[in-house]
Image (spheres, rainbow, N blue to C red):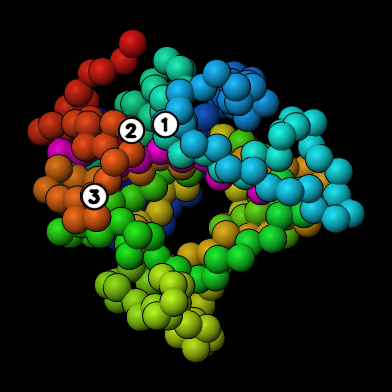
Amino acid sequence: MEALTSEQKTFFDDNGYLVLPGFYDEATMAEVRDQFHDLIANTDGRPAALRYSYMDPAEGYEIDPYNPKNVRGIMDQTLANDYWYNQFLDPRIIEVLIDLFGPDIDFHNGKVRNNPPGFVNDQSWHQDWPYELHTKPELAAAITYLDETDVDQGATSVIPGSHKRGEWPTLESSHTIPDTEVAEVETLTVKTRPGDVLFIHVQVVHTAGHNFTNVSRHKIINEYKTKSAVDCWGNRCAFAGLPLARNGKIVTHPV
């Protein structure tokens, strides 16, 4: 069975991103939020390879009790416990990736991105591709939103269709794209609600939003690739390259 309609697949091919509203229902998201709160509030005793980053409290903003340590990000949340291991194996997500990229799908990496109150994004327009080079750009992230995001609420903005240009020029000092390259192109802010999932191509030009509210905004980002897209940058993230689908069928790994 196909997870996507032909119209959805065409939209992704044309634009490089696809939002699936209400992918997770309210009951599922209640459990996700409970598990996520435990992950960001109880940071002691976690595996050493699970790396947290924190944000200093922003002037004029109170810390959100849901994120009491102002966790800004986590790498390899997949190592936290069985729940987070099974979370990136969700067959419904993998089925979407099969529809978008073909029958052989592998895991790439997992991370968490939070926007605490007063968060200001200091990374401008960019592609993920320069950070994650492979032999071919057959990678996409599945971003699960735990909170409503809008303008000035941590929403992601994209340049639709930008993946069709391949690798964009970047500044020598970073992998960010010069403002002159995006000055006259169409941009779009992807507004989402809890339980929505955004699939975004590795070569889509995008940027994260600021959060000028008193509520932290939280995202789970799991990335996937095709079997034939061979890593060229030395991916050492947990479960990198784990086979998730072969010949269009889910490979079972749950615990």
Please tell me which residue lies in front, 100 or 90: 90
Foreground mark, 2 or 1, reads: 1
- For residue 113: magenta? yes
Residue span colored magenta? 104-115
Say which element carries label 3.
loop
- Total numbered labels placed on residues in the image: 3
Say which element carries label 2.
loop
- In this rendering, the answer to whether 43 lies above or below 10 is above
Residue 92 image position (x, y, % from top left)? 36, 29
Q: Which quadrant does the N terminus fall into?
A: top left
Residue 216 image position (x, y, % from top left)? 72, 42
Residue 218 image position (x, y, % from top left)? 62, 40
Question: Viewed as shown, does residue 3 lie left or right of 192?
Answer: left
**Three-letter code for the amino acid on which mark 2 is drawn:** Ala
Residue 238 shows which numbered tag? 2
**Three-letter code for the amino acid on which mark 1 is drawn:** Ala
Residue at the spot of label 3: 234
Residue 49 shows which numbered tag? 1
Say which element carries label 1.
loop
**Three-letter code for the amino acid on which mark 3 is drawn:** Gly
Q: CA distance from mark 2 to mark 1?
A: 8 Å
Residue at image position (26%, 37%) is 240
Q: CA distance from mark 2 to mark 3?
A: 12 Å
Q: Is residue 28 visible?
A: no
- Dot 3 and dot 1 residues touching (CB under 8 Å): no
Residue at image position (19%, 31%) is 243
Residue at image position (65%, 54%) is 154
Which SS does the magenta portion mostly show? strand
Q: Earlier in the sequence, mark 2 or mark 1?
A: 1
Q: Earlier in the sequence, mark 3 or mark 1?
A: 1
Q: Is residue 253 visible?
A: yes
